[in-house]
Amino acid sequence: QQQVKQSPQSLIVQKGGISIINCAYENTAFDYFPWYQQFPGKGPALLIAIRPDVSEKKEGRFTISFNKSAKQFSLHIMDSQPGDSATYFCAATGANNLFFGTGTRLTVIP
Amino acid sequence: DAEITQSPRHKITETGRQVTLACHQTWNHNNMFWYRQDLGHGLRLIHYSYGVQDTNKGEVSDGYSVSRSNTEDLPLTLESAASSQTSVYFCASSRDSNHEQYFGPGTRLTVT
């Protein structure tokens, strides 16, 4: 059973546009929600993370929106650039484990 | 600079053989993890360790084992490789929690 559900599976955005990736979870014990970015041939790298006591966190062009009541969180990439083309994973921490979504392959077209 | 390395980067083996994938980190992190990455499944936890002599099973541990004899290394062993274990394997480490894991570059394993 997938602990964290992620959508869409793939996303194509024009340069300068907004990329939005959504995730949902069921376990209310999760207490930390990171997003990882992975380039081809590389390991995932932490991009940005949020805890459930805040509704939004922004770092540069990347923003996490968190809706605790709906058990959903999303990643927004503003002014998307070709260099943002990568696979993005949402995740949630609970029960001493980190559960990952299935990933979204983002392609930003110049 | 501190880092996490994996070896080999690519491995082809035959069904039934024992295979060991190495993971070495120089951050002195207590926690280390092994994941496998497959299309449509994302990253799934195989085994993890919170310190020397500590090992725990993850979501997909069947057919895999780990041992932690020092802080720096967590080798992953496939006792009898199966075609279903063809995957990309990532090792990760973190300082003192499941937060902010740092991943290695991965090992692509093919079982023929």
Image (spheres, coloured by chain):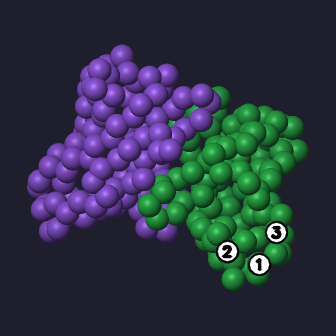
Chain colours: A purple, B green
Q: In this view, does A8 lie to the left or right of B110?
A: left
Q: Which of A102 and A64 is in front in this view?
A: A102
* Disc 1: host chain: B
* Secondary structure category for the residue under label 3: loop
Residue behind mark 1: B15
Mark 2 Cα shell of 10 Å, populated few (<14), some (14-19), many (≥20):
some
* Residue drawn at the location 76% of the way across and 70% of the way down: B81
Residue under label 3: B80
Evaluate if marks 1 and 2 touch, with contact meaning CB atoms under 8 Å apart.
yes
Asked where in the image residue B105 lies, by quadrant, the reply is bottom right
Residue at numbered disc 2: B83
Q: Is residue B109 above or below residue A69?
A: below
Comes first in the chain, label 1 or label 2: 1
Pointers 1 and 3 within a single chain: yes
Asked which quadrant contains residue A16, the reply is: bottom left
Confirm whether residue B9 shows in the render. no
CA neighbours of label 3 inside 10 A, class few (<14), some (14 to 19), many (20+): some
Determine the chain carrying the residue at label 2.
Answer: B
Q: Which of B61 and B105 is in front in this view?
A: B61
> Which residue shows up at 31% across the image and 58% down it?
A9
Give the percent coordinates (x, y) of residue B72: 77, 46
Residue B75 located left or right of residue A82: right
Which residue occupies 28% across, 43% down? A22
Q: Choose between A96 and B29: the one closer to the eye.
A: A96
Identity, as a three-letter code, of the amino acid under mark 1: Thr
Q: Which of marks 1 and 3 is nearer the N terminus?
A: 1
Q: Where is residue A33 in the image (x, y as percent from the top left)?
A: 42, 33
Disc 1 secondary structure class: loop
Q: In this view, does B16 lie above or below A102?
A: below
How far is the residue under mark 1 from the one under mark 3?
A: 7 Å
Judging from the image, mark 3 belongs to the subunit labelled B
